[in-house]
Image (cartoon, rainbow, N blue to C red):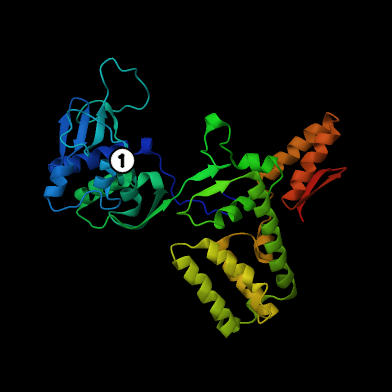
Amino acid sequence: SFSLLNLQIPNTIAKATDHIPEQIELIKQLEAKGLTYKTSDGIYFNVKKYEDEGNTYGELSNIDQIRIEGQRIAENVEKRDKRDFALWKFFATGQKRHNMQWKSPWGEGYPGWHIECSAMSMKYLGPQFDIHIGGEDLKSTHHPNEIAQSESATGCKPFVKYWMHGAFLTVDGGRMGKSLGNAYNLHNIIEKGIDPLALRYFYLTAHYRKQQNFTWEGLIGAATALRRLQDSATTFLKRVAPEKDSNINKSENVLNYTDRFNDAISDDLNMPEALAVTWEIFQDHNLNDFEKAFLAFEFDKVLGLSLTSEKKSLIDEIPAEIQALAGKREEYRKSKDFDKADQVRKQIEAFGYIIKDLPSGTEIKKQ
């Protein structure tokens, strides 16, 4: 999936359950600073004590106002403040046993919802880092709690320089959910014969802070636009080799477009504007072929839409999903279900691959 969407593989993929010792150690640091207290069901962070030490709680989202407006905050009659949150939850007597429980200095149980993120991020990124992302629903409680416990433990402020909260994706104007039968994944897109990169293009057409509505018609439209953009870029890249002109990036036209593209990226990742600038270069008669090819080559390093011929030439391996489709087609052929085999062949071709049946076996090539 990462490869099909031109996504970089993370350096580290961390699981909360693999970092229980780090979470326990972080709670111990908070305990040593007098910022925790014990109730019958767990260890809690003391928000009032945090504020008494000169800190502002919930500044990220004005949580006090949110609380007044009725946002859900878990109730516990033993909590000293409604805003206090669990760092460690005890395994209750009579509670059905499960795998999510560990021994700790306070008793057998499991970490609270928030402590895992602080423990893992600080282990791999240090006490302070630049960018923290998450859904917009985490802005009201989860992220303010992360800030409070992290800055209290380390004394380093700010915990994070930039917070990026993404808006929700709706489907056909409504909520997405497995129970509703509309929680689609990349496999569903491939089954419909749509280029996975169309999903990447679709997401780039909306700002990450703006709610976006997914429809299959919209995705098909994105696939059509993507192919047009790829064809436009390929037209100029076939004519020229942009890297051969070492002075091309100094031309006034190129500098103007580069500045506009960079300005869009710097404007809170305004990808719709960056995409619009990219489309504009192919329609600008004041740009020569070298300049258009160069800009397409450079912009695609950010867009990741496989606009450049060099990018395509580097993809030598056939993606696993394409190989899986080829295998499914072969099964249909062996069972003499040629109609379904032909449907799968069309799906493969929609991704830009050609499949041939040879005496030696099936051959798959990039178009």
According to the picture, the residue beneath numbered tag 1 turns out to be 114
Q: Residue at x 26, y 57 (%)?
A: 158
Pick the front one: 105 or 82: 82
Q: Quadrant of the C terminus?
A: bottom right
Left or right of 170 in this view: 336: right
Picture quadrant of residue 75 = top left
Q: What is the x, y in percent for residue 343?
A: 79, 40
Residue type at tag 1 = His
Q: Nearer the viewer, residue 31 or 229?
A: 229
The residue at the far top in this view is 94
Q: 187 and 140: which one is in front?
A: 140
- For residue 117, side relative to residue 301 (left or right): left
Measured as percent of width and height from the top left, residue 283 is found at 68, 73
Residue 199 in the image: state x and y as whole percent: 60, 50
Q: Residues within 10 Å of mark 1 (few under 14, many from 20)?
A: many
Residue at x-position 27% and y-position 44%: 145
Whether residue 16 is situated above or below residue 77 in the rendered picture:
below
Vertical comparison of 142 with 273: above or below: above
Q: Is residue 258 left or right of residue 336?
A: left
Quadrant of res 131: bottom left
